[in-house]
Amino acid sequence: GAVVSQHPSWVICKSGTSVKIECRSLDFQATTMFWYRQFPKQSLMLMATSNEGSKATYEQGVEKDKFLINHASLTLSTLTVTSAHPEDSSFYICSARDEGGAGNEQFFGPGTRLTVL
Amino acid sequence: DAKTTQPTSMDCAEGRAANLPCNHSTISGNEYVYWYRQIHSQGPQYIIHGLKNNETNEMASLIITEDRKSSTLILPHATLRDTAVYYCIVRVATGIYNQGGKLIFGQGTELSVKP
């Protein structure tokens, strides 16, 4: 299947700082990418849909000013957690839709573990 | 998108077939059934998907009932590496290129493959 990478794989930051997470589709172009968050022992929660060249669409209850999404190219989307606090500590996972594939499957990155002290 | 119901957990002996059920009684005619799995602390991995016909690939088989209200994912010879949380998701297919809707994850089934 297609490959999606994330960077960094883990990050520790101080409360109040901002953290940027990158999501790349390595061998396909993705007009649409998705960002999820997962707390321990819980399922994935969709945060937003990232659209290349336009504004992201956020799910209900997700603060767009806190979680900034930029999808500047067909292979890169970034999620910036602004003014991070300990409650933002979580596993952040991105996915990209392979629109050139026969089944239009979504492929997921390996995730980024964020710890805010 | 329709909601799915899966058992919280299941055990399977190594080498035996693992049959994971999923109920999606409110599925619409244009919704596909997708299966993903997530091994601990990794991103989800695509397994298989189908609309109404049974599907098979190198990883698994998907059996969808005739009324499409339920399905079963079959791992024919489970190994210890198949231990993971398995998610059954129904998703609408839209657009001429089958662009599809959002993948909304439920709680999934935690499969434990034991020696």
Image (spheres, coloured by chain):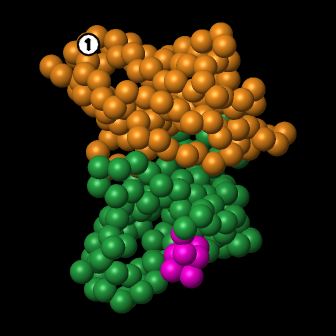
Main secondary structure type of the part rendered in magenta: loop
B79 magenta-colored:
no
Residue behind mark 1: B15
Q: Residue at x 40, y 48 (%)?
A: A43
- Residue B79 in which image quadrant: top left
Q: Residue at x 43, y 44 (%)?
A: B44
Packing grade of label 1 (10 A; few <14, some 14-19, many >=20) is some
**Chain B is shown in which shade?**
orange
Q: Is residue A10 left or right of residue B23?
A: left
**Location of residue A112 (image quadrant):** bottom left
| Quadrant showing the C terminus of chain A | bottom left
User: What percent of the width, then of the height, locates residue A77?
Assistant: 58, 67
Chain A, which colour? Answer: green
Task: Residue B34: name its quadrant.
Answer: top right
Q: Is residue A63 magenta?
A: yes
Give the percent coordinates (x, y) of residue A2: 55, 44
Residue A106 is left or right of residue B5, and the answer is right
Q: Where A1 falls versus B64 (above or below)?
A: below
Q: Which residues are magenta?
A: A62-69
User: Residue furthest toward the left?
Assistant: B115
